[in-house]
Amino acid sequence: MDTLLQQIINGLIQGSLYAIVALGYTMVYGILELINFAHGDVVMVGALVTYTVFSFAAGHGMSAGPALLLAVAASVLVCVPLGLLIERMAYRPLRRAQRLAPLITAIGVSILVEYAAALIWSKQYLSLPELLKPTPIQIGGATTSDLQIAILLISLAMMGGLLWLIKYTRMGKAMRATAQSHDLAGLMGVNVDQVIAFTFALGSALGAIAGVMQIVYYGIGHYLMGFMLGLKAFTAAVLGGIGNVQGAMLGGLLLGLIESLASGYIGDLTGGVLGSNYRDVFAFLVLVLVLVLRPSGLMGQKSGDRA
Amino acid sequence: MRLPASQAGKLAMFAALALLLTVLPFGTEALLGRSWVRVIDGALLFSMLAIGLNVVVGYAGLLDLGFIAFFGIGAYSYSLLASPQFGLHYPFWALLPLGAVVAGLFGVILGAPTLRLRGDYLAIVTLGFGEIIRIFLVNLNRPFNLTNGPQGITLIDPIRIGGFDLSKTYEVFGMKVAAVHSYYFLFLLCVIASIILSQRLENSRIGRAWIAIREDEIAAKAMGINTRDIKLLAFAMGATFGGVSGGLFAAFQGFVSPESFKLMDSIMILCMVVLGGMGHVPGVVLGAILLTALPEGLRYVQPLQQNLFGRVYVDPADLRMLLFGLALVLMMRFRPQGLWPSKRREHELKGET
């Protein structure tokens, strides 16, 4: 029973991170119908910037609170221009090109970001200096910490904020209009280029914060960490219904739970034949199952062909 | 018999090309050393892979990011049945077709759930598929030892044709023909066969159906093309090329491990296709040769950096990846038709607004 609760807690926390990264995929897809492969790598940059800030803070005797704030600020300040640059240089010129072209460009950008990061931060696994000292909290036999609860709460707050922004602000309205039709939104006086750039900036900012939380949660960063994270977040977005913001949130949390429970129990279920080293396989299985059974995802309304 | 001038010219060109290709490995060895002959062998293998991926990406317009998995499946099906791993030593005549069939089956398994959907999903699913195959190759040493895990399989049988063992050195007309040379000729034959097969496919009913689907799937459907089956066929055909070259690779190396089948290798093959010219076989082969030679060329950058800056800033392997990424972005931006495109494709891609 205790392991069950523990797996659920772990799943929810990882799931909330998936959800935030998934938002970046789903917003861009909703507007451009483009899978921004580089989004996972933007998250990676956010995480590694945090590593740099923490190393600096540890060297200068800074305490945890200011270091964390500085890390968030720095990673947002790096990731937002990075996202905008990617949009401007790689995707905008191809907006009306043939379908395959932007997809291939996206892969190219992803490789570029990864190996540029390898040049800056080396290809080693980087362990975060232990500035934060989480206090363990017991909940009915399972262990969590104030840090993990903070991650969950911040993620939920960010999701709430995003929903508000999309539903009630002018920019949100413009985003929804642009997602329906670039041309018509343009005719209604929406500056489509600006809206798309804003979407990338917003997604990158969310991604940057997700990166900070990811590296704080696991304590380890690596220049290729964005790849699997991105793949899973994309799966979460598809699970929820790609292009659908609430769907991405639900999909992220669900995927985190599925992964945590499946990798926690697969050893027992198969009598030890398969172990948790197959963890990364589950996300992919979920993706294939969703595509076969319900391509529009849990909350999507678009037909399979459009999705 | 007198031939018309143009035909005689073609024949002369053909003879010259044949002579050049025959002399190439020996000339290279004399001028640059044996390691470059291995590079040429590698370029031939990658040409086959690129020709296979070209069927999927170039003809049918389906973006496959896990193509290396089929290479891995071919390599492992050869290795398991012709190595001390299970004490089996079947001849390669049986194993190459088997590898092709197994890889083709996996191609269908991979394609089936996604083909109803648009290309982007396919890209992600194939990407995941490639990784999953690798995860299984690494982990299938338990509960029973199928793949020998991360250590891989060693002592794989070389290819034997009749009494002729390709891994041994022979003397032909006073020339020493070593393993790298024998394999060169075998790979060359396979590449030529692949080129002919692939070009015949392109001009067949099926090939035209692929191109129709690439251009406009709904219109193709309206013309009576069974799009699902034809797309699955593209996947299976492409995978088959991957499976065969995987088997050849395993026999040539004598050793396989999951390390050889990573995502970056899939991306490299995709780069070859994109750089050379999607849908144009000669272009794709050019892409494969260029990109196989590139890392070798980049080795010279290391001493150059050392001399210029006094230290090595960029490891050649990383530099290669950076260049790949940049090449993909720049090609799509400025020359989406590739370096050596087919006439038809050039018009299509230029016509896009």
Image: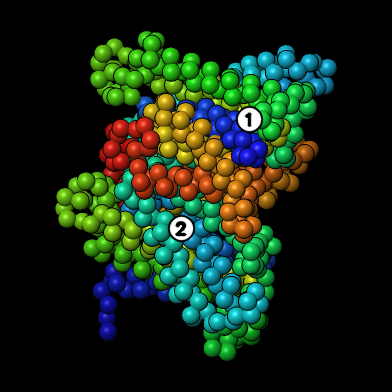
Q: Residue at x 41, y 65 (%)?
A: B104
On-image quarter of the C terminus of chain B? top left
Amino acid at pointer 1: Gln
Which quadrant of the view contains residue A145?
top right
Q: Chain of mark 2?
A: B
User: Residue B308 location, x and y as percent?
Assistant: 74, 38
Residue in the foreground of this view, choosing between B113 and B239? B113
Q: Secondary structure at mark 1?
A: helix
Does residue B26 appear in this view?
no
State which quadrant residue B232 falls in: bottom left
Query: Residue B350 vs residue B324: left or right?
Result: left
Q: Residue A294 in the image: x percent, y percent?
A: 35, 42
Above or below residue B131? Residue A36 is above
| B171 or A304, nearer to the observer | A304
Depicted B55 relative to depicted B38: above or below: above
Q: Circle 1 marks a residue in which chain?
A: A
Q: Secondary structure at mark 2?
A: helix
Q: Of all residues shown, which one is farthest toward the left?
A: B223
The spot of residue A61 in percent (x, y) is 83, 17
Residue appearing at x 37%, y 52% in the figure: B113
Task: Indicate left or right for A54 with B23 as reference.
Answer: right
Q: Position of residue A16 (x, y in %)?
A: 55, 29
Mark 2: few/some/many CA within 10 Å (<14, 14-19, 20+): many
Q: Which residue is mark 1?
A: A214
Residue at screen point 49% across, 21% down:
A159
Measured Cα–Cα span from mark 1 to mark 2: 37 Å
Residue placed under numbered mark 2 in the picture: B50
Residue closest to the far bottom: B163
In the displayed structure, does residue B23 sit left or right of residue A187? right
Task: Specify whether residue B247 is in view.
Answer: yes
Residue shown at the point (54%, 53%) measured from the top left:
B132
Q: Amino acid at mark 2?
A: Ala
